[in-house]
Image (cartoon, rainbow, N blue to C red):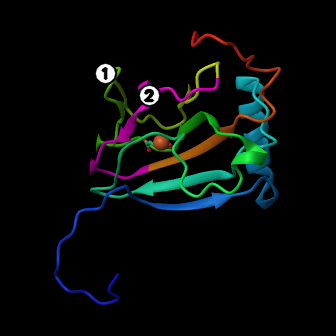
Amino acid sequence: MSDHVTGERFSAETRVAKSAWLADEDNPVISRLTQRMADLTGLDMEAAEMLQVANYGIGGQYEPHFDYKLNNDTDYTTRGGRIATILIYMSDVEVGGSTVFPDIGAALRPYKGSAVLWYNLLQNGEEDARTLHAACPVFVGNKWVANKWVRAHGQEFRRRCSLSQMD
Ligand SMILES: O=C(O)CCC(=O)C(=O)O
Ligand SMILES: [Fe+2]
C-alpha cells in the first residue's frame, strides 16, 4: 500500500468500513450487552469473540462471505468455529446498507435497535453454505452495526449436536 495519494483507483475486496473491538471489561454497557445476548439466545458467551463495532460510510459495504471462514485462526482449537453470528443494527440507513443472503433470497434492512441471529454451522458441526451473506453499499446515510461472533465451544448442552444436518 502506498502512503500517498496517487489517484490510482482500486476496488476493495472485502469490507469497506471502520471497525473496533470492544471487550466486556472495557465498559459495563458492553458486559451487559453480552449478558443480554446470552439470555436471549441461550448461548454461552465464554468463548465468543469481543464485540466488533463497525461503521460504513457512503459506499461502505461488505462483499459476500461466510463468517465461518476464518483466516489464520489461532484460537480454533480452544474456541471452535463461529457457530453463530449476532448482528445488531445501531442506526437506520436512509438508502442502501441491507444485509443480504443471496442464496436464500433474504434482505434485511437496518433499523436502529433491531438485531438478527443466524447459525453458521449445522447441528452436525458442518459449515452451512446457505449462510453466504453481504452488506450492500450505503448510498445515503451512515450505517453502524455491532456484531458478536459466537464460538462453538461451550454450546454442547445449549445447542445440541446431531448426526443429521437437520437444524
Ligand atoms: O453489516 C452487515 O450488514 C453485515 C455484517 C457481517 O457480515 C457480519 O457481522 O458478519
Ligand atoms: Fe459476516
Q: Which residue is mark 2?
A: 129
Q: Is residue 138 magenta?
A: yes
Q: Is residue 48 above or below residue 84?
A: below
Q: What residue sits right under mark 1 in the picture?
A: 105
- Asked whether the residues under the numbered discs 1 and 2 touch, taking CB atoms below 8 Å apart as contact, a structural biologist would say no
Question: Around disc 1, counting alpha carbons within 10 Å, would you say few (fewer than 14), some (14 to 19), or many (20 or more)?
Answer: few
Q: Amino acid at mark 1?
A: Gly
Q: Is residue 78 above or below residue 158?
A: below
The vertical placement of 98 against 117, above or below, is: below
Please state the horizontal and vertical placement of residue 162, each as a whole percent of the image.
69, 13
Q: Is mark 1 within 8 Å of ligand 1?
A: no
Question: Does 60 lie within the magenta span?
Answer: no
* Extreme-front residue of the structure: 163
Label 2 Cα neighbours within 10 Å, binned few <14 / some 14-19 / many ≥20: some
Q: Nearer the viewer, mark 1 or mark 2?
A: 2
Name the residue located 52 percent from the left edge and 60 percent from the top edge.
Answer: 19
Query: In terms of image quadrants, where is residue 147?
Result: top right
> Foreground residue, 124 or 118?
124
Element type at mark 1 = loop
Q: Whole-percent x and y of residue 29?
A: 75, 49
* Position above or below: 140 against 134: below
Bounds of the magenta segment: 125-143
Q: Amino acid at mark 2?
A: Ala
| Left or right of 131 on screen, residue 30 | right
Query: Would you say the beta carbon of the disc 2 residue lies within 8 angstroms of ligand 2?
Result: no
